[in-house]
Amino acid sequence: MAQAQQTRESSALSSCEAYFEKVNSRKKLPQPLQETLTTAFARIPVSSFPQVPAGKVIEIQADTTVADAVKVLSECNILSAPVINPDAATSMNWRERYLGIIDYSAIVLWVLETAEVAAVALSASTATAVGLGAGAVGALGALAVGVTGPAAVAGLTVAAVGAAVAGGVAADQASGGDAPAAADNLGKEFYKVILQEEPFKSTTVKSIVKSYRWAPFIPVATDSSMLSVLLLLSKYRLRNVPVIEPGNPEIQNYITQSAVVGGLEGCKGRDWFDCIAARPISDMGLPFMSSNEVISIQNDDLVLEAFKRMRDNHVGGLPVVEGPSKKIVGNVSIRDIRHLLLKPELFSNFRQLTVEDFISTVVSTGQEIVRVTTPITCRVDSTLGTVIQSLATKRVHRIYIVDENEVTGVITLRDVISCFIFEPPNFFDNYFGFSVKEMLNK
């Protein structure tokens, strides 16, 4: 177990190092300019960064149900929120006060595992018909999909899974249905399970926040430098950085990748920014991945497959392409999982729902029309400034590079932030007093 943990830590750190090494080896900015920018960011205190809207960070109580947490994220139009431990709400230690961050990534991981177990349990309905108990059906399902630690940690025991779906399976058998029919009806039964039945209905944020986390919870102090934040959001792949005032455990600000890129857009007109923004993206080494590394989804693939692909490749969105030419026709992101959870009545055929049908249904509700139907694109000769402007004004997290409508690359918020900085030797070891390896293990 310890060896496996060390391997994961080493792999995560190596990935961060390899990414940033590639970034800095491909950038064509003069070294003196890079050093000047890095030095400037190192002198800017985090406290100078603009506050979140309304000046108050949205937080979610650990005993909130997952369904209610999705509603909060959606209604506040945010991707994530810090999770408060109700048993330590008055603690002056942030490590005790906050359990981590809940985001759509964690929710997707939980939903997919739940769906996989439920699918196999439903498909195994013939086992119930021949006398096996509900718990056994759940056990068969877990063995079939290889479900391990997280489900148990989250309190979603195998027997409970079997019990939760048993009612739907029994009803299907009584009406003369067979196992394939039960599996094809997964959408209806799955939503009944996750929204109305135990233990899923009462599953809390606390149950999944650590088991399904995407990234560690790493706050910085208000007197920290913006360079530390930019490095966490770029090289070290965090999507958000909580800000805590020394002596006060409450989160004072919440800096996201989107907010930083929006801040860069606001620097338009300043000599240093205009000098860099006028350069073609190729001068920055963008895109940082080759065309054959781009992960996409066909519009006639299942939407569940799209979310699985995001999970498996640790990415937050995919271009939706059509046919062998892979013409880009849309975009689906990890935050779109909320549509499935908030409006289950619109997606009853969950197991058979294609990406194209999913997008059409979302559009029919009048929501997210621009995000899903009009993928944000640029060309290989675009300037960095136009890319930043598109990301900031359209409030998206990635822009696709196209050549005759075929996706040849992707530029993310992380990539853009990485263009402006480099990491001084031993910066984190010296600045924070603990190693990056230890941080990634938090």
Image (tube, rainbow, N blue to C red):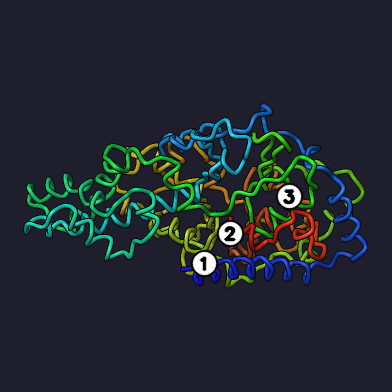
Q: Earlier in the sequence, mark 2 or mark 1?
A: 1
Amino acid at pointer 2? Asn
In the depicted structure, whether residue 369 falls above or below residue 413: above
Could you tell me how far apart the alpha carbons at marks 3 and 2 are, in whole angstroms?
18 Å
Q: Which numbered dot is residue 339?
A: none
Q: Nearer the viewer, residue 89 or 379?
A: 89
Residue 46's image quarter?
top right
Q: Earlier in the sequence, mark 3 or mark 1?
A: 1
Residue 116's image quarter?
bottom left
Could you tell me how far apart the alpha carbons at marks 2 and 1 are, in whole angstroms?
9 Å
Q: Which numbered dot is residue 5?
A: 1
Q: Are marks 3 and 1 in contact (CB under 8 Å)?
A: no
Q: Residue at x 45, y 42 (%)?
A: 206
Q: Residue at x 90, y 51 (%)?
A: 272
Return the residue at label 3: 229
In the depicted structure, whether residue 49 falls above or below residue 236: above
Return the residue at label 2: 441
Q: Is residue 7 left or right of residue 230?
A: left
Could you tell me how far apart the alpha carbons at marks 3 and 1 are, in whole angstroms?
26 Å
Q: Nearer the viewer, residue 82 or 342?
A: 82
- Across and down, in percent, residue 433 comes to 74, 56
Amino acid at pointer 3? Val
Q: Are marks 2 and 1 in contact (CB under 8 Å)?
A: yes
- Say which element carries label 1: helix
- Say which element carries label 2: loop
Q: Residue at x 70, y 57 (%)?
A: 234
- Quadrant of the drawing holding the C terminus: bottom right
- Across and down, in percent, residue 182 comes to 19, 53
- Across and down, in percent, residue 191 comes to 30, 43
